[in-house]
Amino acid sequence: MDKQEFENYLKKIPKAEIHVHIEAVITLDTVKKLYKNRFEKEMSQEEQDSLFSYEDLNGFIQAFLKVQDLLVSEDDFNFVFDDLSDYLVNNGISYCEAFFAPTAFLKKGFDYSKMIQVFSKKIEQIKAEHNITVKLLLDVSRTFGLENAMNNYNLLKEYPCSHVIGIGLGGAEQKGPAKDFSPVYEQAIKDGFKVVAHAGEDVGPESMWDSINYLHTQRVGHGITAIQDEKLIEELAKSKLPLEICITSNTFTKKIVQKASEHPIRAFFDKGVFVTVNTDDPVFFKTDLLNEYWICHNELGFSLDEIKQLIINSFNASFISDAEKQDFIKQVNEAY
């Protein structure tokens, strides 16, 4: 089976993606549209090339912030969610839990409640038009410190929305140790929200231990440095704490993984660790969910039956009800 045949087949299978950032599904056409609206001129080819030119995680984060800066009003999120809708449809995704990071927009004077109104309208539109469910996780962000993270969380509480189900901790992992944010996580758990955290992406396994012990995270975003700690692997296999694996993203940063064929997802899977497949930032890393599964199959030796298990894992790792999980898994079994 070649790549096109594989992707055509897999597109028909219901899938979940539980680690993707909404700003990172913006297409180049939308970037150019937002740029023209922001600066009242066309975006040059040199500027386009520069925007997507980076060599490490911090460089990528700076590019991510530049894209965020192109949005000038809450209504610009309509474009973001239109691109998200196309992305989900094109990849045969039935359920998605996506991150949104409000800090940069709040610093620009955006109104959080208006942002949430746009999000809700577009999420309901995606559901009505495509029968795809989207839930959001607010990235409280480790980049700007504890006070900012708590302020973000307080907005989540102040403006409750059924589409926003919890919090995440993204940003520069080296600059914001997980345990520094335990007060935010303690409050979120107390208030009944879901909690996840990026960890073990750009820092060693100690970051994952801290996310588990101090944040009580319900999933770990990336988690690839667990491969350096056999005790942690044993703990993950025992606890079945899900890892949100993003192969192309991890390969790009080259901090732990130099090429896709060396990615530890294969070792994790074989050792009984609960792994899921995701994209993280598809436009920035020039990938999509179908391609990530193809990499699993073509470069990491996952059989079609194992690919099916990875798909089922993503539904089981999601925050939907057990009944909804079973319904999606039934659809996967029928389509496979």
Image (cartoon, rainbow, N blue to C red):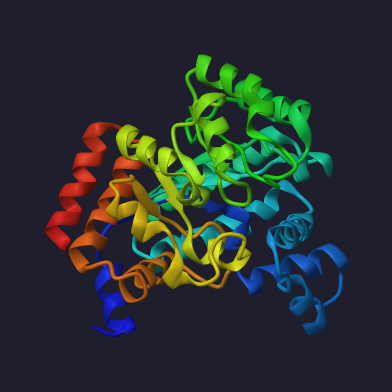
Question: Which quarter of the figure has residue 6?
Answer: bottom left
Q: Position of residue 323 (x, y in %)?
A: 21, 34
Q: Residue sitting at 63 percent across and 33 percent down?
A: 178
Q: Quadrant of the C terminus?
A: bottom left
Q: Residue sitting at 25 percent across and 50 percent down?
A: 312
- Give the camera-side residue of 208 and 186: 208
Relative to 64, 204 lies left or right: left
Classify 129 as above or below 323: below
Q: Residue sitting at 78 percent across and 84 percent down?
A: 45
Q: Residue sitting at 32 percent across and 56 percent down?
A: 15
Classify 231 as above or below 202: above
Q: Quadrant of the N terminus?
A: bottom left
- Give the camera-side residue of 310 and 139: 310
Q: Position of residue 286 (x, y in %)?
A: 56, 73
Classify 334 as above or below 119: below
- Give the camera-side residue of 125 and 285: 285
Relative to 327, 146 lies left or right: right
Q: Position of residue 13 (x, y in %)?
A: 25, 62
Q: Position of residue 67 (x, y in %)?
A: 73, 60
Observer able to see residue 319: no
